[in-house]
């Protein structure tokens, strides 16, 4: 999927990155399925798709045996978890600042 520079700047950046992430995820799942069903070794598959063995095994450990919808759901949950961690850290920082302010006033 190719997008022109004008379209890139005219669209929402998050939407574009999600589209590309979905394409990459679909490619990862396709490569892993190819490795599972094909008679080729993982080295040949890595060479064909121009990825390292380390990348292949990292993908295999993370997405091995998953379908595309399951992998997309995993990514959504990871993204949500990251946002929740940031919110928690902000709230803890605010609480600490209030504690320090109260100690100074007391």
Image (cartoon, rainbow, N blue to C red):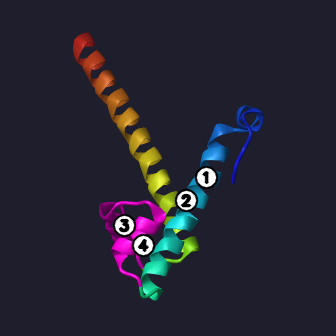
Question: Which picture quadrant has residue 92?
Answer: top left
Residues under numbered marks 2 and 1 in contact, where contact means CB atoms less than 8 Å apart: yes
Residue tagged by mark 1? 20
Q: Secondary structure at mark 3?
A: helix
Lateral position of residue 29 relative to residue 56, left or right: right
Residue tagged by mark 3? 56
Residue tagged by mark 2? 24
Residue tagged by mark 4? 45
Q: Nearer the viewer, residue 1 or 94?
A: 1
* Mark sitting on residue 30: none
Residue 63 in view: no
Residue 86 point in image, percent of width and height: 41, 40
Residue 4 point in image, percent of width and height: 74, 39
Residue 67 point in image, percent of width and height: 53, 77
Lateral position of residue 13 relative to residue 101, left or right: right
Mark before the other along the chain sequence, 3 or 1:
1
CA distance separating discs 3 and 1: 19 Å
Residue at 41% over, 82% down: 40
Residues under numbered marks 3 and 4 in contact, where contact means CB atoms less than 8 Å apart: yes
Report the magenta stretch's main SS: helix
Mark before the other along the chain sequence, 3 or 2:
2
Vertical position of residue 72 compared to residue 104: above or below = below
Residues under numbered marks 3 and 1 in contact, where contact means CB atoms less than 8 Å apart: no
Q: Secondary structure at mark 1?
A: helix
**Magenta residues, start to end:** 40-64
């Amino acid at each position: 999927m190719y997008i022109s520079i004008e379209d890139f700047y005219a669209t929402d950046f998050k939407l574009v990155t999600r589209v590309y992430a979905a394409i990459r995820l679909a490619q990862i799942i396709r490569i892993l399925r190819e490795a599972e069903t094909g008679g080729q070794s993982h080295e040949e598959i890595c060479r064909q798709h121009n990825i390292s063995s380390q990348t292949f095994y990292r993908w295999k450990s993370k997405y091995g045996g998953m379908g595309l919808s399951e992998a997309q759901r995993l990514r959504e949950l990871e993204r949500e978890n990251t946002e929740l961690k940031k919110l928690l850290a902000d709230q803890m920082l605010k609480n600490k600042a209030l504690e320090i302010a109260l100690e100074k006033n007391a």
